[in-house]
Image (cartoon, rainbow, N blue to C red):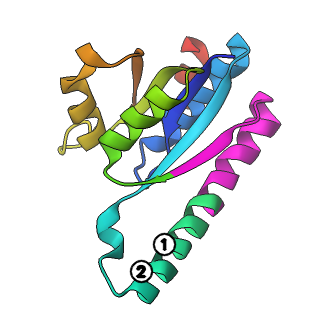
Amino acid sequence: MRKFLVVLDDTRECLNAMRFAAMRASHTGGGVTILSIIPPDEFNHWIGVGDIMREEARERIIAHYEVFAKWMRDKQHVEPELVIREGEPVPEILAHVREDPEVGVLVLGAGSGKGGPGPLVTQLTRSSGSLPIPFTIVPGDLSKERLEAIT
């Protein structure tokens, strides 16, 4: 089964990327993998404190994931899977793409503000010629109706 890989983070544009991935998966018989990455710099504390912070980060990710997963199940009839990795975002995304042969498309949300599309879109666009799969950039300010029309 071809899977759409979408990155879960705290950005607003992440919502449209999730919607797009779920709608495309629903319409094409695919699956969705939701990847969340915990940056290593969050745990540069004492070992005990770092372990507690890592567990709290995982709990926040799972709670955030459950909101998207419920919507995907109820509205799109797609059962997503959650993958949590630790490290730098771009290398971890690329590593996951290479490790999971079922991932067929990477879906990223692009910011529409003054800050540009965001660091993931910027960095991955630079290396897009060497990516082993295509990726889709979903504008963060597309309406739900427009997303439904194009998926």
Amino acid carrying label 1: it is Arg
Name the residue located 50 percent from the left edge and 69 percent from the top edge.
57
Question: Magenta includes 67?
Answer: yes
Check whether the beta carbons of the residues at disc 1 and disc 2 lie within 8 A of each other. Answer: yes
Element at badge 1?
helix
Question: Magenta includes 26?
Answer: no
Asked whether, in this view, residue 104 is left or right of residue 63, the answer is: left
Cα separation, mark 1 vs mark 2, equals 6 Å
- Say few, some or many: other residues with alpha carbon within 10 Å of mark 2 (under 14 / 14 to 19 / 20 or more): some
Residue under numbered circle 1: 54
Residue under numbered circle 2: 50
From where the camera sits, is residue 143 visible? no
| Picture quadrant of residue 142 | top left
Residue 15: which numbered mark, if any? none
Asked whether, in this view, residue 41 is left or right of residue 144, the answer is: left
Asked whether, in this view, residue 35 is left or right of residue 67, the answer is: left
| Picture quadrant of residue 138 | top left
Asked whether, in this view, residue 134 is left or right of residue 101, the answer is: left
Name the residue located 27 percent from the left edge and 30 percent from the top edge.
124
Amino acid carrying label 2: it is Gly
> Residue 148 appears at what percent x and percent y?
61, 20
Q: Which residues, given as a range, are shown in magenta?
A: 63-84
- Check the image and report above or below for 127 versus 88: above
From where the camera sits, is residue 9 visible? yes
Name the residue located 56 percent from the left edge and 65 percent from the top edge.
58
Element at badge 2?
helix
Front residue of 147 and 73: 73
- Check the image and report above or below for 111 versus 134: below
Q: Quadrant of the N terminus?
A: top right
Name the residue located 42 percent from the left edge and 48 percent from the top edge.
12
